[in-house]
Image (spheres, rainbow, N blue to C red):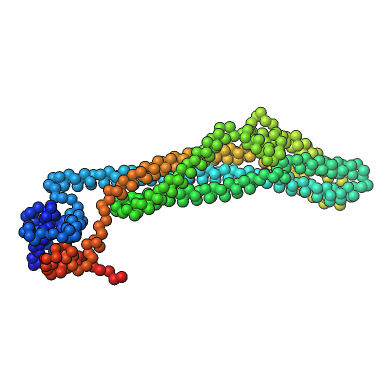
Amino acid sequence: MTQPHRIRAGLVAGGGLGGPGLGPEPHFHRCLPHPLLLLPAPRASRVQDPLARRRLRHLELHCRPSRRLPASARSRKDSSIRWMEKVRFWRGSESRAAICIGIGIGFYGNSETSDGVSQLSSALLHANHTLSAIDHLVLETVERLGEAVRTELTTLEEVLEPRTELVAAARGARRQAEAVAQQLQGLAFWQGVPLSPLQVAEDVSFVEEYRWLAYVLLLLLELLVCLFTLLGLAKQSKWLVIVMTVMSLLVLVLSWGSMGLEAATAVGLSDFCSNPDPYVLNLTQEETGLSSDILSYYFLCNQAVSNPFQQRLTLSQRALANIHSQLLGLEREAVPQFPSAQKPLLSLEETLNVTEGNFHQLVALLHCRGLHKDYGAALRGLCEDALEGLLFLLLFSLLSAGALATALCSLPRAWALFPPSRNPSALCSGSRLSEPLLPAGLDPGSPLRSFPGCRRRPH
């Protein structure tokens, strides 16, 4: 068993590492690999070299950070330090918990905003489908009537040429068909308009896609900063806390910027949603050049606004009824005398039936109910879901900014209480640690073993 080394080197001179007869110093044993028993040395053998005194003082400061205190005082001091560390840790943890709550609110607000914008895009796409269907039906009906006038009615007039009254009836049907085509052309009110709901929906979806992705990345960044900061506080890692402090400063700037953007957007959107009809009417009229009667009919859709296409629809319906009656009269009178007139008459009746079917579809599509329903769905998506999501995002940015500002103020104080990292390399410089500490006249004795964990590393 290794015997304790007895050093009579004046270690107690001027206060030294301990008083006479205090026995082994526990802190000193942490620095040296051998158990030491410090005994008072004769006055003649005490250290006289100033350099040796400084080295002894250096060893005292590194191996004994504080003087021996009573057990109760040391216990109170240690508990006070631990309590302050816990306070700093939980203060930083509370701010990070507030950030985590804000992140949850941010995810909900981002989802609500995305749902509102998606509802707006869907309403615009449905309105574009309705307007495209109106244009397609009008174009198809007009082309079919024009083809019937050029072919079937011309053939019928040639066949019925010997009978003047029958030719007059066929020409009357021609005039009615041309009148129907002319009236129907005025129903395609959106044809040639530069503003396309499809293009607006695509632009809105494009912007919303990148907005949603940017907020998801910001939320994930804040979550990672929060988790790694808590890890650094728990592990008492200074470098990790410092890196997360810098990242918190960056996220704080992003949070303030997003909060300003969200506040401005929410204020503008709430102002728009308080009375959207006049603004939408004026903007649409400016962009499309349509009359205010048509726009008011579709945007308001109430008893006070009449259908601007009612007269055209009434005239077209009467003209179609007249054509139908004239064709029935020609079929009764002309077919018995001119059998070759039966084929163009049947073709005309088929064209008339298709035209009447398209006309009824046009009447349903031109009614304000469909487009006004799309307009209401767009407003609900924009003024309810999207605005609600913006308010939650604003709350998220506010919570994040406040919590990050609190964390930035508390983190430097927290890492100041971390225990200092020990650097034993200064005490593990070679194989003879005791030689510089002894006066020139004393034998250093056998060399001390190197510290565990203080072995030389190859350069």
Q: In the rendered view, tell whether residue 222 sits above or below residue 275.
A: below
> What residue is drawn where x is 48% and y is 39%?
391
What x and y, as percent, mark residue 228? 36, 52
> What residue is drawn where x is 92% and y is 43%?
164
Furthest toward the top, the residue is 304
Indicate left or right for 317 with 407 as reference.
right
Residue closer to the observer: 117 or 242 = 242
Which quadrant is the C terminus positioned in? Answer: bottom left
Q: Total label count? A: 0
What x and y, as percent, mark residue 153? 85, 48
Residue closer to the observer: 237 or 10 = 10
Which quadrant is the N terminus positioned in? Answer: bottom left
The reply to whether residue 457 is visible in this rendering is yes
Residue closer to the observer: 335 or 222 = 222
Indicate left or right for 430 with 237 as reference.
left
What x and y, as percent, mark residue 18? 11, 53
Furthest toward the bottom, the residue is 458
> What residue is drawn where x is 8% and y is 61%?
45
Indicate left or right for 8 with 111 as reference.
left
> What residue is drawn where x is 60% and y is 39%?
375
What x and y, as percent, mark residue 109? 46, 43
The reply to whether residue 369 is visible in this rendering is no
Residue closer to the observer: 117 or 75 = 75
Tell me the quarter of the picture where residue 197 sits: top right
